[in-house]
Amino acid sequence: MSRQLMPKQEPKDRRHNFHEVALGYTKDQALAEAQRCLNCRQAFCTRGCPVEIDIPGFIAEIKKENFQQAEKIIKAKNSLPAICGRVCPQESQCEKECILGRKGEPVAIGSLERFVADWEYKPPLTEKPTISPQNYRVAVIGSGPAGLTAAADLACQGFQVTLLEALHAAGGVLHYGIPEFRLPKKIVAQEIAYVQSLGVELQTSVLVGRTITIKELLENGYAAIFISSGAGLPYFLNIPGENLNGVYAANEFLTRVNLMKAYQFPKYETPVRLGKRVAVVGAGNVAMDAARTALRLGAEEVTIVYRRSLAEMPARLEEIENAQEEGIRFRLLTNPIAINGNDRGQVTGMQCVAMALGEPDSSGRQRPEPVPNSEFSLAVDNVIVAIGQGPNPVLLQTTPELKLNKQGYIQVDPETMATSIPGVYAGGDIVTGAATVIAAMGAAKKAARQIAIYCNNQAAESKVVK
């Protein structure tokens, strides 16, 4: 059978609203897609899942229309299935390993996971696991995908978990970084509510490094700490004109729109001033999110400016295709060298140079090199810079005992996720740099297992001393 296509809003409609683009499988579609699964004896798909979901197991339950059991199997490994079903790059992980994909189309594992997760929120809700309480307190810093995963896993093992979030709303990049049309806030809120239902205490507006330090948390009775504060420091182009009015970092732009609800201005007093022509520099998922958001906020012409070709774009193919369908323009093999402005300090254009691909660089992609005498001007009213983020500096500046790598991220033992401070672990973007939601979750699960071992070892040593 052919793979079931996910229904979507029509491009002509969705480019003007913030409603979810992908509409999810119907029951009949989910059952038809589940029937494609061969239930392989060797589940290569599960090997491709960073959080180790029993993929054939939950799909087998879908075939029997036992959606509650399917959801239970997923949540044994993944506390955020509705999120992962929407934003996880399954095409490069579990679906990439699917046997059917060798000669045709792989099973739509992500779409089935989303179906099960969404079905859960129709009563009755899932039963929670039986938890045996332990007398250890663990602090989790950051409530993004890594923090939520670690908190849930530790809570299920009986630990008293406190989840500390710097902003006024939990969710991290899930809340402020991913647009409503790709990941609705109500879905994030439902997943967070489930994590809290496991006994996790959530404290918002707590900026670790300012409100309280790592040292103080350890002194206040926390047996262990997991750091997942993300990579929230935006990188810039370092070109003339970058301080003009109308230039945004993608982080700032998306935070204003998502967390502060600028898309509902004037109901919420958080305007985002955009002109008719917007250029987004970069070609990752964040760049696609920023470009598609700008279009929905009223920009008439939105252009992705990228120094490599389409083949080297790091964004998911699905997101590139969605952007193209919605009318986003792509100016490839182009690199900005200056941003132009008027006497009022407002953006009027961007100076660019054409690029050509040369020899491969350290990432394996062909290195872009300027073409001589190829400068030209691009007329724009706004520039959104989406070329990556660095580690959140606040916590790092107040914790000099933490060893960092050459890139400024927290250095950990890759097997245990342990940092240079005993009892302190880290995972997610604060360790790897900007990566995927599911990669952060995989690191968090590994850290949670090691934190449990660490606490039990500490307890055993204290009994020996006594």
Image (cartoon, rainbow, N blue to C red):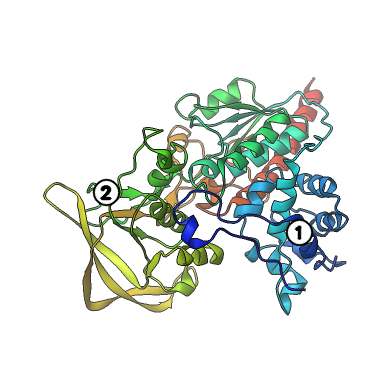
Q: Nearer the viewer, residue 6 or 93?
A: 6
Name which residue type carries label 2: Gly
Residue receiving disc 2: 246
Amino acid under label 1? Ala
User: Does residue 47 appear to the left or right of 332 in the view shown?
Assistant: right
Locate residue 88, reporting x and y percent: 62, 55
Residue in the image at 21% along x and 72% along y: 375
Query: Which of these two is toward me, 54 or 24?
Result: 24
Query: Picture coordinates of residue 282 (x, y %)?
Result: 40, 61
- Observer-nearest of 58 and 184: 184
Which sits earlier in the primary sequence, circle 1 or circle 2? 1
Which residue has dot 1 on it? 30
The answer to whether any part of residue 350 appears in the image is yes
Above or below, 16 against 228 in this view is: below
> Looking at the picture, does residue 217 appear above or below residue 1?
above
Quarter holding residue 128: top right
Decide if residue 307 is on the left or right side of residue 64: left
Q: Residue at x 50, y 36 (%)?
A: 401
| C-alpha span from label 1 to label 2 | 45 Å
Which dot, 1 or 2, sits closer to the camera? 1
Q: Nearer the viewer, residue 382 or 210?
A: 382
Element marked by disc 1: helix
- Check disc 2: other Cα within 10 Å, few if <14, some if 14-19, many if 20+: many
> What residue is drawn where x is 34% and y is 39%?
271
